[in-house]
Structures are given as C-alpha cells and as structure tokens.
C-alpha cells in the first residue's frame, strides 16, 4: 500500500477520533485531553528550540508570561475578546523573547542552558515578589472567560467545557500545524544545520544569531499561546503551576527526552506517556513518586545509552528495519531522523 | 556603641556565617565540576540530607557532638555510593551535557521525595547547651552559636586548603581538575580519586547541613533554595574555580544578610540578575579559566 495514503489515513482517523471524543467518552474525559493538548503544545514549542540544538531549561518563562498576560488583560480590560487575548499572550511572550535573545544567542551549549535557568528563576522571583500585579504565591485568577463570537456561526460560551474542548482543539491543532510547517520550510533546514554544525551554517552565508533569534521568538510565541490557553482552561495560574523551574520547564524537557529528542512527534508521545503515568500512580501516594524517580534515573543512566532518541527513536529504527525487510532488504530507503 | 554600627556588625557577621556555609556546599559542587565535568544538581540535597540525619542522630544519641561527627559521615558515604553506582555511568552519554544534568536532578528529586516520606516535612532542633547564649563585644550581644558556625567553617576551610595545596592527594586533585586524562595515564587510580572527592564534597555539604539546622527551619523548599544559590555561586565564580566560589559565596552571604534588611523584595531577584549578566558577558565566570 502506498505509504502516503497510510499516513494521511492515520492522521484523518486520529483527527476524527479527537472530534468525536466528547460525544463518546463524555465531557470529563475530554477535559483531561485539553490538559494534554496544552502541555503538548508547550512541549512542541520547547521542542522547536531542541530541534535547533538550543536546550532550554527555562521555557516556562514564556509559558508563564503568556498566561499572566492573558490573565491581566482579561481582568483589567472589560469585554476583551477571547482570540485577541490569546494572541496577546503569544505576542507579549514573543516580545520578551526578542528582548532576551541578544543575550541568549551569544552563548551556546551548557552556558545557554544555564542562562535559560537564570531567566526562569528571575521570572519566578518577580512573580512571587511583586504581588500587587501578579498575585504572588496564590497566583492570578480570572472570573469569567469571554465568549467566542464566530461570524456566521454564532456565540459560544467558553465557560462550557464542551465548547472549550473544540476551541482548544482548534487552537492546538493550528499552532502545532504552523510549527510543523516551519520545520518543513528551508528555514527548518537551517534549524537542523544550527543543531548539527553552527559554524558550517555561518560559512554558508546565513546569519546564525538572527536565525537563532527567529527560532526563539517563534518558540516563545507558541509557548505564550499555550500559557494563555492554560489560564483560559483552569482560570487560575500560580508561579508553581506555570513558572516553576522543575515542575514545568525541566519536566517538560524530560517528556521530550522520553518521546524522542530531535523528532517532531516525540513530544506528543513523551507528554502522553508522562501524563498517563501520572494518572496511573496518582492513587498510590508518595512511594510511587519515589519509584518514578528511580525509573527516571535508571532510564537516563542506562537506557539512554541504548535508546538515546527515546520512543520515537526506537519506533524509527523499527520502521526502517521493517520496511527494509518488506523490500527484501534490497534498495531500502534510509529513513533517518536521528541527528549526528 | 552606636546602635546602627552594632546592627551593621551583627548583620555582616550573619552574612559571613551564611556565606561560609554556602561555600561549604558550593566548594564541593565546583570541585566535582572541575574534576568530572559534571554539574551535580543533587549536591545541595545531600546538604539537606545532612540536616535530616542530624535530627535522627540527635534523637538516638541526644548529643550534638556525636551527631556533628556521624551525620556528615553518613551523608558522605551515601554520596560515595551515589557516585560509584549511579553517576559513574554518565561518561560517554550520547545526549551530551543534557544527559548528565538530568540524572543528577533525578537523584535530587529522589532525595527530596525520600525525605518527605521517611522524615517529617519540616525540621528544627535546639541549639546545644554549651553553645547557647550570647557573647558581648563592646555592647553588642551576638549568639555564640553563630560564632561557632563561622569557626567551624574556617577550620574546615583551612583543612581543605591544606589537603588541596599541601598533600599528595591534593596534588592529584589539582592535576585532575586541569586534565583528567593525563592524570589517569600517569598510573593514578582516577576513579578512586573521584570517589574520594565526591565523598569529601558531600561530607562538607553534610557538615553545613548539620551546622545550619539549629538556626533555620529546614524543609524541602529550603533545600531547593540552597541548591539554586550554590549553583548560582559556582556559575558566577567560574565553574571549577575554588577561589571564585569562596569570594562569591561570601559576597552572597552578605547580600543575603543586608538584602533581607534593606531591600527584601529585590534581594532574591538580584542574585539572578548578577547571574544573567555574568553568563551573558563572561560565560566562564568571574574566576573561571577554561571552558
């Protein structure tokens, strides 16, 4: 069978299932899926940086900025529509990224990672201390989510979980689609080039700091959108839930690592696995948490040597082997997304 | 004595004590990075472990001095075990430095979770009888225990300087900081040296943990804050640089003491502002030499 038909078939079945989930499994389960979608959008935006070899441990900064911007806009401006509020979160996040990127693009490797940690902690400290604006430790709440007004279709109440599911689904799918498209353009190739050999990209005549800035800004924009969706979904954000270094930034990075670093689909799988695991162990208390950390350590110490590119890496190497076997090990096309 | 001057001296002594303890934690971190190229995020959590073992041993023996001796030893032993069985496998990780930082963070969270399971959530112990009370210097009443902390840190600092600059082991450690491969090719059992350095580093963190318990409430958030602070100290001082860690730790101790009094809102943020500036314009740190 044609490989292309299979792929499109898979995506349309998946999308159809997503559309039908509230009808089949009920609104409560659909609501869990909204949480998954928001985390996945955030993880994919973080993965945009990881795809370019910029390993950020402070991406929660942009997530939090998006959430707080939308929250502040909705609480201080009366009758602020929902789509501009969402875009505002993304744009302010992108502006923050633009402001910080002159410092971020100067350095690479472990120093980049540490600088992102510093920025994240700076944002966390500010949100904790300036409680007149951010609400401090208890966070920021919005009391009413504006309704969505679609010309020709009518007005939808976004406080209703059922309509919010479709709203969030649309936003997440569109955002991830745009990011997927960006990685497929020539600019996506520059991203890969910066990851593999940044000097060679510079010799080819590309302006590396400019490209890096663009990547950081795009990534921050979508992280901001994810943050905005978060506050529209749960109506309250606190530094703990959207700006925390370990709980947000590093755990999401871990999810990407589990799903497969350097692949576009990896983050979905990683976030899915981690959230599913979290739901499974929820009732077993802190002992289960202890076991989780043992598993994490052993995965990172031992399994990461065998399968460094996570679940997607295993999947891809299996796919390569199976397709080679199907073509009688002859002229198999080498499918490789594993970086050097 | 002038009341303002007395306050100033008291605060700077507070800052000195805090800075010395911070150095006890940060020095281990910077030594481990210098030798093994490993940014060990779990280091400050061994420090917290020291504080919790202190409470346990105090319950068993009811004697502060035995506790001060035993608790850091147990912590050092645990550190050596962690290095021997877990962190040693980090070499040649295909994920590069990401694959090195995340497992140490995993160990940090493992310690954090274990502590919240096996011990109480928050911890405070009483100052031992001999060290209770105040000394009076020219009208300023200052707690003896804080002097004891400063003295203890100075003794450990001198012992460490002696170890590093006057003994054969210190020679090997200094050589390993500058080039591990050459040292191992000279017939030195480098993995044993790694274990010993890891043990000493975690032992010092344990001492700091025990010494701190009588004057602070110790809990999970506290260890997290210390982990960040020692991490920032090491980065600003320069990764792998002991003098850098010393200077910056004392600086941050004073910043902490005076910051709380004069600008409580900005003090915790200021630390990260300095970190951002140093990383942006001098990524190797103020005293760092090599990358």
Image: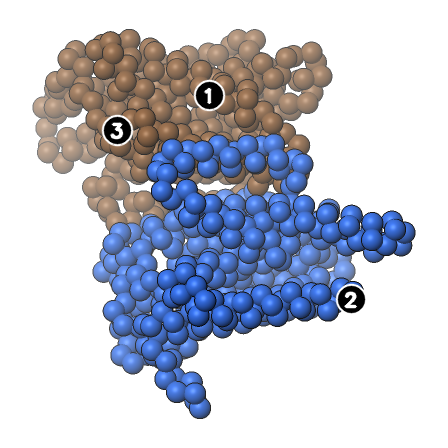
Chain identifier of the residue bearing label 2 in the image = A
Q: Residue at x 47, y 49 (%)?
A: A276
Q: Is residue A249 left or right of residue B177?
A: left
- Residue pushed farthest front? A24
Instruction: Work out whether B232 lies above or below B198.
Output: below
Q: Which x, y percent locates residue B2?
A: 10, 32
Residue A178 quadrant: bottom right
Label pair 1/3, CB-CB below 8 angstroms? no
Q: Position of residue B229 (x, y in %)?
A: 38, 37
Query: In the rendering, which numbered label is found on residue B79?
Result: 1
Question: What residue would you read off at disc 2?
Answer: A2
Query: Considering the numbered disc 1 on the image, is that residue within a helix, a strand or a loop?
Result: helix
- The colour of chain B is brown
| Image marks 1 and 2: residues in contact by CB distance under 8 Å | no
| Chain letter matching colour blue | A
Q: Residue at x 9, y 23 (%)?
A: B139
Q: CA distance from mark 1 to mark 3?
A: 22 Å
Q: In the rendered view of the protein, which quadrant contains the N terminus of chain A?
A: bottom right
Q: Tell me the tag on residue B275.
A: none
Marks 1 and 2 on same chain: no
Q: Residue B120: which numbered mark, if any?
A: 3
Indicate whether A328 appears above or below A4: above
Q: Residues within 10 Å of mark 3 (few under 14, many from 20)?
A: few
Asked if disc 3 and disc 2 are in contact, CB closer than 8 Å, the reply is no
The crowding category of the residue bearing disc 2, from other C-alpha atoms within 10 Å (few below 14, some 14 to 19, many at least 20), is few
Disc 2 secondary structure class: loop
Co-location on one chain, circles 1 and 3: yes
Q: Is residue A276 above or below residue B169?
A: below
Judging from the image, mark 3 belongs to the subunit labelled B
The alpha-carbon separation of the residues under discs 3 and 2 comes to 61 Å
**Left or right: A185 with respect to B254?**
right
């Amino acid at each position: 069978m044609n490989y292309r038909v299979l792929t499109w078939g898979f995506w349309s079945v998946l999308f159809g299932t997503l559309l039908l989930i509230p009808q089949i499994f009920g609104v409560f389960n659909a609501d869990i899926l909204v949480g998954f979608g928001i985390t996945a959008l955030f993880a994919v935006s973080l993965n945009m940086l990881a795809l370019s070899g910029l390993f950020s441990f402070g991406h929660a900064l942009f997530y939090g900025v998006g959430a707080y911007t939308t929250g502040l806009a909705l609480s201080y401006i009366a009758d602020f529509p929902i789509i501009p509020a969402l875009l505002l979160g993304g744009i302010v996040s992108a502006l923050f990224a633009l402001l910080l990127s002159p410092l971020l693009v100067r350095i690479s490797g472990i120093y980049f990672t540490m600088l992102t940690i510093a920025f994240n902690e700076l944002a966390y400290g500010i949100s904790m201390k300036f409680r007149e604006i951010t609400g401090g430790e208890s966070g920021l709440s919005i009391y009413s989510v504006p309704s969505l007004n679609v010309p020709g279709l009518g007005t939808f109440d976004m406080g209703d979980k059922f309509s919010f599911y479709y709203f969030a689904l649309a936003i997440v799918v569109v955002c991830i689609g745009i990011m997927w498209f960006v990685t497929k353009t020539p600019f996506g190739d520059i991203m890969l080039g910066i990851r593999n050999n940044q000097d060679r990209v510079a010799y080819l005549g590309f302006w590396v700091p400019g490209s890096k800035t663009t990547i950081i800004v795009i990534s921050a924009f979508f992280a901001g959108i994810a943050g905005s969706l978060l506050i529209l979904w749960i109506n309250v954000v606190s530094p703990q839930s959207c700006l925390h270094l370990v709980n947000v930034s590093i755990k999401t990075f871990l999810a990407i690592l589990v799903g497969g670093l350097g692949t576009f689909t990896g983050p979905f799988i990683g976030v899915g696995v981690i959230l599913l695991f979290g739901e499974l162990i929820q009732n077993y208390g802190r002992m289960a948490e202890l076991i989780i950390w043992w598993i994490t350590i052993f995965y990172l110490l031992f399994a990461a040597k065998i399968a460094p590119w996570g679940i997607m890496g295993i999947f891809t190497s299996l796919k390569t082997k199976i397709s080679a076997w199907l073509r009688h090990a002859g002229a198999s096309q080498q499918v490789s997304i594993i970086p050097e | 004595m002038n009341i303002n001057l007395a306050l100033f001296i008291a605060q700077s002594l507070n800052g000195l004590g805090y800075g010395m303890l911070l150095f006890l934690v940060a020095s281990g971190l910077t030594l481990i990075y210098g030798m093994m190229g490993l940014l060990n995020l779990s280091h400050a959590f061994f420090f917290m472990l020291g504080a919790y073992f202190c409470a346990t041993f105090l319950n068993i023996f009811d004697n502060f001095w035995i506790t001060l001796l035993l608790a850091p030893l147990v912590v050092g032993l645990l550190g050596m075990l962690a290095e021997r069985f877990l962190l040693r496998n980090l070499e040649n990780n295909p994920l590069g430095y990401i694959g090195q930082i995340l497992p140490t963070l995993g160990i940090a969270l493992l310690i954090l979770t274990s502590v919240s399971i096996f011990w109480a959530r928050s911890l405070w112990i009483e100052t031992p009888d001999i060290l209770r009370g105040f000394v009076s210097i020219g009208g300023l009443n200052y707690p003896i225990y804080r002097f004891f902390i400063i003295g203890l840190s100075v003794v450990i600092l001198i012992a460490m300087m002696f170890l590093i600059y006057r003994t054969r082991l210190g020679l090997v450690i200094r050589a390993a900081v500058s080039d591990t491969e050459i040292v191992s090719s000279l017939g030195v059992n480098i993995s044993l040296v790694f274990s010993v350095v890891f043990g000493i580093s975690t032992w010092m963190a344990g001492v700091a943990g025990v010494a701190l318990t009588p004057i602070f409430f110790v809990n999970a958030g506290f260890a997290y804050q210390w982990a960040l602070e020692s991490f920032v100290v090491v980065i600003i001082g320069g990764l792998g640089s002991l003098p850098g860690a010393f200077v910056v730790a004392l600086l941050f101790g004073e910043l902490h003491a005076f910051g709380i009094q004069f600008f409580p809102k900005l003090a915790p943020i200021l630390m990260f502002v300095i970190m951002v500036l140093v990383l942006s314009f001098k990524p190797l740190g103020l005293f760092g030499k090599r990358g």
